Image: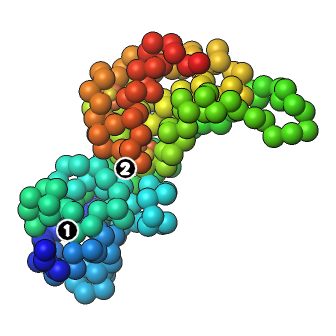
Amino acid sequence: MKNSYTITLKIKRYDPDSKRSWVQDYELGAGRILRFTDVFRKINNELDPSLAWDSSCEHAQCGTCAVRVNGKPLLACELLVENAVAYFGTTVFEVGPITIAPVVRDLIVDFEHAYERVNKVKPYIIEPAQNPNPGEEYHIDPRDLDRYVEATRCVNCFCCAEACISSHKGFLGPNAVMASIVRLMDPREQAEEERLELLYSEEGVYRCHTSMACSFVCPKEIDVAHFIALAKAGKFK
Ligand code: SF4
Ligand code: SF4
């Protein structure tokens, strides 16, 4: 096992002032357990302070550092150099912003724009059911919770939407529809009609081709396509 690698990042850059975009090569030495966010920081510190990228938690809990590496949407904070070399079988990596939202600069995209899809499905309980035990916490039967708790791990990184060919067109996208499906599976939600109307609309689940690309790329290992399949079959309970 090597302790460090000489890697080349071919990073897609964009300058909003001149509207110019280009690919810039950075060759550098990187320790095997550096994450790609560390590599971007190293580039800033040692080679080019002007490279713009984004991150927040750097623990795979916020989705801010989603990028494409050799075409695969992923979280840069989760990708170790040694794993990238093993997975892609190369030390040369093409890095670009995700394309589901407009680019602000270099690797930074306008997530507000991407969130419009999620906000459209109202990712919260619209009409809460009455608690059968007033004054106590709402107890959800663990068998009900088991059916959808996996989906609550979603951090809205939009990697699934990036991988989904349909979500670049009229489809709300896998994470957005899943956010609504989860609420329909939640016994506390009563606004079923409103949710079903959007889910079965032109922008809804029937735009999905069941390719499962969403499930394959999800960094939280959520089987997104499974939830969409349940919705297509009307199996929410
Ligand atoms: S389902 Fe997975 S890939 Fe999609 S937004 Fe949520 S965490 Fe990201
Ligand atoms: S299974 Fe459906 S939602 Fe997932 S990537 Fe394929 S078309 Fe998109």
For disc 2, the marked residue is: 219
What residue is rendered at 65% in x and 36% in y? 124
Give x and y (percent) for residue 221.
38, 44
Q: In the visual, does 142 lie left or right of 146?
A: right
The single residue placed furthest to the right in the displayed view is: 135
What residue is rendered at 78% in x and 25% in y? 129
What residue is rendered at 28% in x and 75% in y? 34
**Mark 1 crowd level (few <14, some 14–19, many ≥20, 10 Å Cα):** many
For disc 1, the marked residue is: 82
Give x and y (percent) for residue 73.
29, 49
Q: In the visual, does 209 lie left or right of 131?
A: left
Quadrant (top left/top right/bottom left/bottom right) for the N terminus: bottom left
The amino acid type of the residue labelled 1 equals Glu
Give x and y (percent) for residue 219.
37, 50
The single residue placed furthest to the bottom in the displayed view is: 46
Considering depth in this image, is 52 or 6 the residue closer to the camera?
6
Q: In the visual, does 2 lie left or right of 192?
A: left
Residue 76 seen: yes
Q: Are marks 2 and 1 in contact (CB under 8 Å)?
A: no
Q: Label 1, secondary structure: give it.
A: helix
Q: Is mark 2 within 8 Å of ligand 1?
A: yes
Q: Is residue 124 above or below residue 129?
A: below
Q: Is residue 93 above or below residue 222?
A: below
Label 2 – label 1 distance at C-alpha: 17 Å
Q: In the visual, does 121 lie left or right of 125?
A: left
What residue is rendered at 22% in x and 56% in y? 69
Q: Earlier in the sequence, mark 2 or mark 1?
A: 1
- Image quadrant in which you'd find residue 137: top right
Q: Label 2, secondary structure: give it.
A: loop
Give x and y (percent) for residue 17.
33, 65
The amino acid type of the residue labelled 2 equals Pro
Residue 12 seen: no
